[in-house]
Image (cartoon, rainbow, N blue to C red):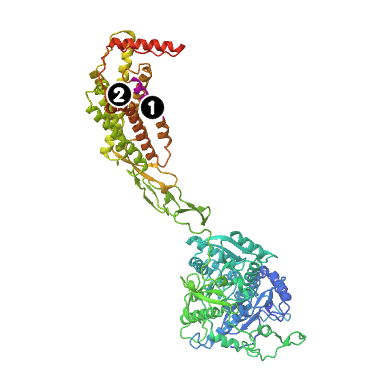
């Protein structure tokens, strides 16, 4: 399979033995005069489209021959980036040893293997036309025109040589399929031409998702998975690391931009990951461009993860800029296959690159290729027209050429050097895929030959020429074990299945940093997180998230337009966390739990007997009950004595009963609320005071009427007998009782739990209060009748203040009423002023019961204690006095009136006439 390495294309434009510009102008000149030759015109248009590149490359051609020709029955095209992009407008630059020479030699190696295999394409030799793309899409387009020239029919009937003979035109070889290209931008440019001429194309390295469009690139296939799979794998890595906020960085061009676009689209569809920044690196970055990029990435410093689809040079310059910005260890790079496991982008930048996770299509080193390539020499590899240049570059020596002076700074090549022995060698990562691409076309041709040329040796008429669209169908149908043992096949879009190795650049010690396989992706991710380590050897997973998870009891308040960013807001007050995004107010009978994730029942309280708020009123009430009982017992014991009889026994017992009930209500107000307790509270709360003040009002009214009547006549007023007094008292009392029973009928007594009264801002202090259905207003209404009686009684006491103190109880009753009014006036602000207090119920209950007890004490002390004192300690005073007639009372009233009139000139003490 060896042949002369310097065989060139038959098309004059590409023949490196002739001046380039001469043949271009001649060829175009011919077509200008032959307007009937439309194929030539079409080709002229194609040449014109790339004419600028052609002109630029003309001067460079002698240094970089354009093609390798391997003869064969069937010819395959090959596109490889033998040289880098040229500087300053030159199409080609320095030699690319790995991506160029290794990959191209892999195609030659695969052709050798296929042609020596008796089972695959027997009696058919595969040849090749291999071109250099110089890593530039426009230059590659120019070169790829070589593949289609044979398909352009030329009419030479009118062309004659100068001697009149027809010209002898060598027919160019027909390329049935093309292996390549490497860069996605080159493959896209070439695919647009090849599809016009129905030439199938199989790439070994182009991964742009755009090439999966079977409508636009229907003749394109690839043995590497598209970046959409890679983007999915990278998204799965990001999610596995718990990141949800990352930036993207792409080199301008098809590979970088389409890779990032695929990642962004997949992340949007999958959800859960947001893009903080999407930065593009220009094709021709200006000075300081990468520092600006780092500065921009730091605008969202929480997005430490950076998804990077960039070429090697851009990756290196990004790492350098990060180091300059003193951000070593801040960024967490997730690199695409353009980074892979390469050492060149991270050389001398290991500290910045530490922890970088990279991805590479699953590959294996092909041992057969290693043996083949390391055995190549200047003598046995003459078919590779770029091998001399590789040799000089690899061994850093200089080959002697006639007419070229040897550079004294470089040693002379001996030709005895050996690859891998005298130079470092490591198989380039895409070698496997180059071999698989060549084999895919070979297997497709083999299947086609079996179907179209059954039993025939060599290429039969049915395969001459090979129909491109039919060959494409056979290529898409192949299924075989590739050079690395993995299955090679294509889906309906011509894409290979996604199989990736996942690497992390680790520095276990600073002397031996390197890439370590930490997982793989084959439609789903298998990642060994425990084997990962980050900057400084840290094993804990770093964060790349916009917002940290909210604590229990906090809701997420989303940032508009960024679903991964939020603010955490505490569910405050009586709210609890309903779900991730909402707080809800607890029901009125509940309060939030300490972590605010649910509600819990509000504790129910009541006034306990051991509370100070209960002990003080209960003690006073008990003392009052004992005192009242003592008075009643004394009165019963001395019922017929003059003092008891003079005090009006009937009304006194009624009044004492009222005082007793006033003391008794304290215990009902403290007792645990129930239906019976609530009923008695309603009944007795106002009844005790109504009885007391009804009796007092009857007494003061009787005294007032007697003395008022005495001023006018000696005829006694009506209804002053004991029976009349009792009737008046019970009539007054019945009004209170009737009101209570109407209340019973309208709203039957019952208990309630009041959750609003003790619901302060701090829900931990919230309590439900078990109470009777008596609001503050209903308590005041219940007491209002008694207050009316009290005020009326006070008015009569004031009017009767001039009555001589020797007559009945007018003045003691007056003092009682004044004091009582003062007590109740103090009660109102205390009762209503504590409405906002957390102990409102306790304070109000204590205030009410103490006020009532004090009122009872005043009544008991003013009216009955002096009598009891006389009865017990001075029985000698408890004697019958002469009965006074109404006439004597009338005379006393008149004297009292006269005395009050004379007081304006000075005090005059009028002694009543006791003789009557």
Q: Would you say residue 811 sits in the magenta stretch?
A: yes
Q: Is residue 183 magenta?
A: no
- Quickly name the residue at label 1: 819
* The quadrant where residue 172 appears: bottom right
Q: Position of residue 202 (x, y in %)?
A: 54, 75
Residue nearer the viewer, 475 or 389: 389
- Return the x and y of residue 71 as percentages of the image width and height: 60, 85
* Looking at the image, residue 604 lies above or below residue 334: above
The quadrant of the image that shows the C terminus is top left
699 or 581: nearer the viewer: 699
Residue 125 appears in the rendering: no
Residue 100 visible in rendering = yes
- The answer to whether the residues at label 1 and label 2 have Cβ atoms under 8 Å apart is no
For mark 2, give the secondary structure.
helix
Left or right, 189 with reference to 891 = right
* Magenta residues, dominant SS class: helix
Q: Picture coordinates of residue 581 (x, y %)?
A: 45, 53
How packed mark 1 is, by other alpha carbons closer than 10 Å (few <14, some 14-19, many 20 or more), is some
Q: Of helix, strand and loop, which one carries label 1?
A: helix
Report the front residue among 132 and 313.
313
* Vertical relation: 907 (above or below) 311: above
The answer to whether residue 406 is left or right of residue 491 is: right
User: Residue 182 lies in what quarter of the image?
Assistant: bottom right
Horizontal relation, residue 102 to residue 34: left or right: left
Q: Which mark is residue 95?
A: none
- Could you tell me which quadrant the N terminus lies in? bottom right
The answer to which quarter of the image holds residue 173 is bottom right
**Closest to the observer, 249 or 301:** 301
Mark 2 — residue?
A: 694
- Residue 277 in picture, x, y percent from top left: 58, 60
The residue range painted magenta reads 810-825
Marks 1 and 2 sit apart, C-alpha to C-alpha, by: 17 Å
């Amino acid at each position: 399979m060896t042949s002369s390495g310097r065989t060139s294309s038959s098309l004059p434009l590409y023949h490196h033995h002739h001046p380039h510009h001469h043949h271009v102008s001649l060829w175009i000149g011919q077509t200008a005069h032959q307007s009937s030759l439309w194929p030539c015109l079409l080709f002229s248009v194609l040449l014109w489209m790339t004419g600028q590149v052609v002109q630029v490359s003309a001067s460079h051609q002698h240094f970089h021959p354009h093609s390798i020709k391997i003869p064969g029955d069937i010819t395959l095209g090959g596109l490889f980036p033998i040289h880098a992009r040229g500087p300053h407008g030159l199409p080609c630059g320095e030699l690319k040893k790995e991506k160029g020479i290794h990959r191209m030699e892999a195609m030659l190696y695969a052709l050798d293997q296929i042609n020596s295999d008796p089972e695959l394409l027997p009696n058919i030799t595969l040849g090749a036309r291999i071109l250099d793309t110089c890593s530039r899409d426009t230059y590659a387009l120019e070169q790829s025109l070589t593949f289609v020239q044979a398909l352009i029919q030329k009419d030479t009937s009118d062309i004659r040589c100068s001697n009149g003979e027809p010209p002898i035109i060598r027919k160019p070889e027909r390329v049935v399929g093309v292996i390549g290209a490497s860069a996605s931008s080159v493959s896209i440019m070439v695919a647009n031409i090849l599809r016009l001429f129905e030439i199938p194309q199989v790439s070994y390295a182009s991964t742009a998702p755009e090439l999966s469009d079977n409508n636009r690139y229907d003749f394109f296939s690839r043995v590497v998975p598209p970046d959409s799979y890679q983007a999915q794998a990278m998204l799965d890595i990001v999610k596995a690391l718990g990141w949800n906020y990352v930036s993207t960085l792409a080199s301008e061009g098809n590979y970088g931009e389409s890779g990032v676009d695929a990642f962004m689209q997949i992340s949007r569809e999958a959800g859960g990951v947001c893009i903080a920044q999407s930065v593009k690196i220009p094709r021709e970055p200006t000075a300081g461009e990468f520092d600006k990029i780092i500065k921009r990435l730091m605008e969202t410093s929480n997005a430490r993860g950076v998804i990077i689809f960039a070429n090697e040079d851009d990756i290196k310059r990004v790492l350098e800029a990060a180091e300059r910005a003193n951000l070593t260890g801040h960024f967490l790079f997730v690199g695409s296959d353009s980074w892979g496991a390469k050492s060149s982008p991270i050389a001398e930048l290991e500290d910045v690159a530490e922890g970088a996770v990279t991805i590479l299509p699953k590959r294996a080193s092909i041992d057969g290729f290693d043996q083949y390539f390391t055995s190549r020499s200047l003598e046995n590899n003459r078919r590779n027209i770029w091998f001399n240049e590789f040799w000089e570059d690899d061994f850093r020596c200089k080959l002697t050429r006639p007419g070229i002076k040897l550079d004294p700074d470089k040693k002379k090549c001996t030709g005895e050097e050996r690859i891998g022995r005298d130079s470092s060698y490591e198989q380039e990562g895409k070698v496997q895929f180059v071999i698989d691409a060549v084999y895919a076309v070979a297997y497709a041709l083999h299947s086609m030959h079996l179907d179209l040329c059954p039993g025939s040796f060599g290429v039969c008429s049915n395969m001459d020429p090979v129909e491109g669209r039919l060959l494409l169908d056979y290529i898409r149908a192949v299924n075989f074990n590739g050079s690395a043992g993995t299955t090679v096949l294509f889906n309906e879009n011509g894409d290979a299945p996604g199989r990736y190795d996942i690497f992390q650049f680790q520095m276990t010690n600073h002397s031996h940093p390197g890439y370590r396989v930490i997982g793989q992706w084959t439609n789903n991710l298998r990642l060994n997180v425990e084997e990962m380590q980050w900057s400084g050897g840290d094993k804990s997973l770093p964060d790349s998230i916009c917002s940290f998870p909210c604590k229990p009891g906090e809701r997420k308040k989303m940032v508009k337009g960024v679903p991964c960013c939020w603010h955490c807001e505490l569910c405050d007050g009586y709210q609890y966390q309903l779900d991730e995004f909402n707080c809800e107010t607890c029901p009125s009978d509940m309060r939030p739990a300490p972590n605010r994730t649910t509600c819990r029942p509000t504790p129910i309280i009541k006034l306990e007997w051991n509370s100070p708020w209960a002990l003080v009123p209960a003690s006073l009430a008990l003392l009052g009950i004992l005192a009242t009982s003592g008075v009643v017992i004394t009165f019963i014991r001395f019922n017929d004595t003059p003092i008891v009889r003079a005090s009006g026994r009937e009304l006194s017992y009624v009044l004492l009963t009222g005082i007793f009930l006033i003391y008794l209500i304290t215990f009902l107000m403290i007792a645990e609320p129930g239906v019976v307790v609530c009923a008695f509270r309603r009944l007795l709360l106002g009844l005790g005071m109504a009885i007391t003040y009804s009796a007092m009002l009857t007494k003061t009214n009787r005294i007032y009427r007697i003395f008022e009547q005495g001023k006018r006549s000696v005829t006694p007023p009506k209804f002053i007998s004991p029976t009349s007094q009792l009737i008046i008292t019970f009539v007054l009392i019945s009004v209170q009782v009737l009101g209570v029973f109407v209340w019973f009928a309208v709203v039957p007594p019952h208990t309630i739990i009041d959750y609003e009264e003790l619901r302060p801002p701090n829900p931990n202090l919230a309590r439900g209060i078990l109470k009777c259905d008596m609001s503050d207003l209903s308590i005041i209404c219940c007491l209002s009748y008694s207050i009316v009686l009290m005020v009326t009684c006070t008015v009569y006491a004031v009017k009767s203040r001039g009555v001589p103190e020797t007559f009945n109880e007018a003045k003691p009753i007056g003092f009682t009423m004044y004091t009582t009014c003062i007590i109740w006036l103090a009660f109102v602000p205390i009762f209503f002023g504590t409405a906002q207090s957390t102990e409102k119920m306790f304070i109000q209950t204590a205030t009410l019961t103490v006020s009532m007890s004090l009122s009872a004490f005043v009544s008991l002390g003013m009216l009955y204690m002096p009598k009891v004192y006389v009865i017990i300690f001075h029985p000698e005073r408890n004697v019958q006095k002469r009965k006074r007639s109404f006439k004597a009372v009338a005379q006393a009233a008149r004297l009292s009136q006269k005395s009050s009139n004379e007081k304006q000139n000075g005090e005059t003490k009028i002694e009543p006439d006791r003789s009557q």
